[in-house]
Image (cartoon, grey):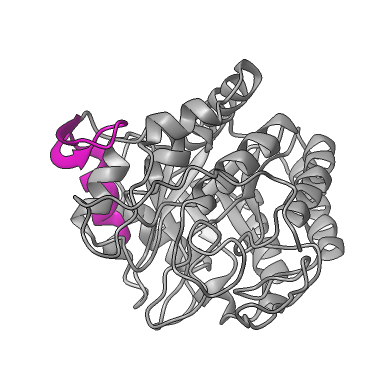
Amino acid sequence: MKTELLDLNTAEPERADLEPGATLLPPPADLRASIPANGFVKERVSRARGSIERILEGVDDQRLLILCGPCSIHDTNAALEYASRLKALADRVADEILLVMRVYFEKPRSVVGWKGLVYDPDLAGSPAGLNGLGIARRLLVRINEFGMSCATEFLNPIVAPYIHDLMAYGSIGARTVESQIHREMAAGMTLPIGMKNNLEGDLRSAVNAVVASNQPHSSFATDSFGRPCIARSAGNPYAHVFMRGGRSGPNCDAASIAQACEALREHPLERPIMVDCSHANSGKDFRRQAANARNVAQLYCQGRTEIAGLMLESNLSEGNQSFFPGESHDSERSLTDGCIGWDETERVIEEIARSLKSRPV
């Protein structure tokens, strides 16, 4: 489906001083200037980050944070339609739930496959170009203009500065949580960051990432103009554990959450636990997500107030589809992991909101 969002169209001519096969990127500062966040969007992002921080601190102890949206964005028109529906739902449940939209542009690949919209926005299976970053940034601006806040997984540290100013929430994934570079990156970000346990399901990987990201760092990085530099960060006090299960099995039960809290006993946050209802916690079966979400909400209502919230992989249509380079794809169905459909999304979130409203205080 042809995107309605304009491509970046800033391809550099071939230069003799570039390595063979390299293409020069515009610095993050230049892309942010050409696709700016207006005053409303900046205020929206800042307010949403503050709201999430208050949930993690326990200052807002009446609401759950729910991250909800496609496993990955592959069609921008469908993403805008989803954002519009989610905004209406967010307004209806705002007293009980803070809804934030998953807007994921990069997919970690252990072998091969579609790597995400910033790499291949035309679904052509072609090498990464310049257009993906511009399309991603324009989409984030539009979603925030709707009044819907955004969350993503930060995968490539080079990509992060192009989009992180438009995100209310970020995560570090199971494949990169043990990476020093990603822990340093999280320490320098001014937004809440969820640290997922590793693929084996080892909780210590996430706890160590939280501890490391809380600390000040001096690290090699690039600045907003793309220049190599030594970056100094004070640490991120809103780094927290994100439980997603692993090869050892799910970890979204009461015992696992209690274990995580014990491991985090020195962590200053009152509500340091997020639970992924998908991935290994669902055995990669999207049909189990709703039951997981209900169970997590029930644990919170029963007194496990260390839980800050949960995540659902959801799309306009349920299930997923295979990626065939250069061919047409269903705009409403996930191109990566299977997702619950919109009707079930709406139903389970409204059900959780009712349970939170009726819980004893």
The one nearer the camera, 185 or 201, is 185
What percent of the width, then of the height, locates residue 314? 71, 63
Any part of residue 57 in sight:
no
The relative height of residue 239 versus residue 125 in the rendered view (above or below) is: above
Horizontal side of 89 relative to 27 (left or right) equals: right
Corner quadrant of residue 185: top left
Q: Which residue is drawn at 38% across and 57% down?
A: 155
The relative height of residue 127 versus residue 83 in the rendered view (above or below) is: below
Corner quadrant of residue 60: top right
Q: In which quarter of the image is the C terminus?
A: top right
Q: Quadrant of the N terminus?
A: bottom right
The one nearer the camera, 235 or 95, is 235
Any part of residue 294 in sight:
yes
Is 221 part of what is drawn in magenta?
yes
Corner quadrant of residue 233: top left
What percent of the width, then of the height, locates residue 178? 24, 62
The one nearer the camera, 242 or 161, is 161
What percent of the width, then of the height, locates residue 95? 76, 32
Q: Give the range drawn in magenta.
A: 206-232
The one nearer the camera, 315 or 49, is 315
Q: Residue at x 31, y 60 (%)?
A: 177
Horizontal side of 11 relative to 121 (left or right) equals: left
The relative height of residue 152 versus residue 116 in the rendered view (above or below) is: above
Q: Residue at x 48, y 47 (%)?
A: 306
Horizontal side of 80 relative to 183 (left or right) equals: right
- Looking at the image, how many numbered discs can be counted on the residues? 0
What percent of the width, then of the height, locates residue 126? 50, 72
The relative height of residue 1 versus residue 17 in the rendered view (above or below) is: below
Is 173 part of what is drawn in magenta?
no
